Image: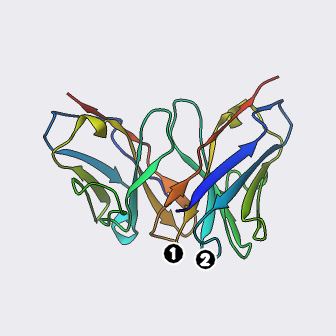
Amino acid sequence: QMQLQQWGAGLLKPSETLSLTCAVYGGSFSGYYWSWIRQPPGKGLEWIGQISHSGNTKYKSSLKSRVTISVDTSKRQVSLKMTSVTAADTAVYYCASNPPPYDSGGFEKWGQGALVTVSS
Amino acid sequence: SFELTQPPSVSVSLGQTARITCSGNYLGEKYACWYQQRPGQSPVLVIYQDSRRPSGVPERFSGSNSGKTATLTISGTQVMDEADYYCQAWDSSSGWVFGTGTTVTVV
């Protein structure tokens, strides 16, 4: 049974870099795509971007200039970095697994979520 | 850019049928997924590929997708079905897009 566990800094100052890691336990790692999603307090879900096990990425266009998603297959980990954060980036951040077929299977498993607060 | 629109809220009587719509241009030509999110919890996939249920999801959850609208139907709605529901679809230009979300209330 696949489980996703996330961790990272929860409180940042404006202009700092957000850094989160998601570890995958159990199940397959290769053959999956891995996405990051965020949810501002009291608001809806927003997809940030995805990466394949081989490192191919796609990002939401409005965030592309600030976001990097990377993968370490040896550790079965996926990471998210977002530069120059502002208060608008305050949200719960989730990682999620996307099995094949990648454009229709949806996000099968989700991490527990990590609240990131940006405040001076 | 590709967008998905849902009604903010749906109210349903206990044991009755709730229908949640999701609208977007050419949505019927893509696959729709649906997620349930209870307060303080991570979302859970309840429908993928328009109408398929993951293992463990009750049969009262069903989905359809045609034209510009995808629909999630909850038959015999129970109190435990009170939650926020989000549709989702993949667009080759925009990537994954989530709907605006619908709060289901059981009265």
- SS at badge 2: loop
Residue at image coords 83%, 46%: A83
Label 2: how many Cα within 10 Å (few below 14, some 14–19, many 20+): some
Q: Which residue is mark 1?
A: A100
Looking at the image, residue A82 sits to the left or right of residue A106; the answer is right
Please determine whether, in this image, residue B23 is positioned above or below residue B17: below
The CA distance from mark 1 to mark 2 is: 7 Å
Please determine whether, in this image, residue B58 is positioned above or below residue A102: above
Q: Quadrant of residue A34?
A: bottom right
Between A78 and B92, which is closer to the camera in this rendering? A78
Looking at the image, residue A114 sits to the left or right of residue B91; the answer is right
Q: Which residue is mark 2?
A: A31
Between A55 and B98, which is closer to the camera in this rendering? A55
Identify which amino acid the numbered label 1 is placed on.
Pro
Residue at image coords 73%, 56%: A64
x then y, percent, for residue A22: 70, 54
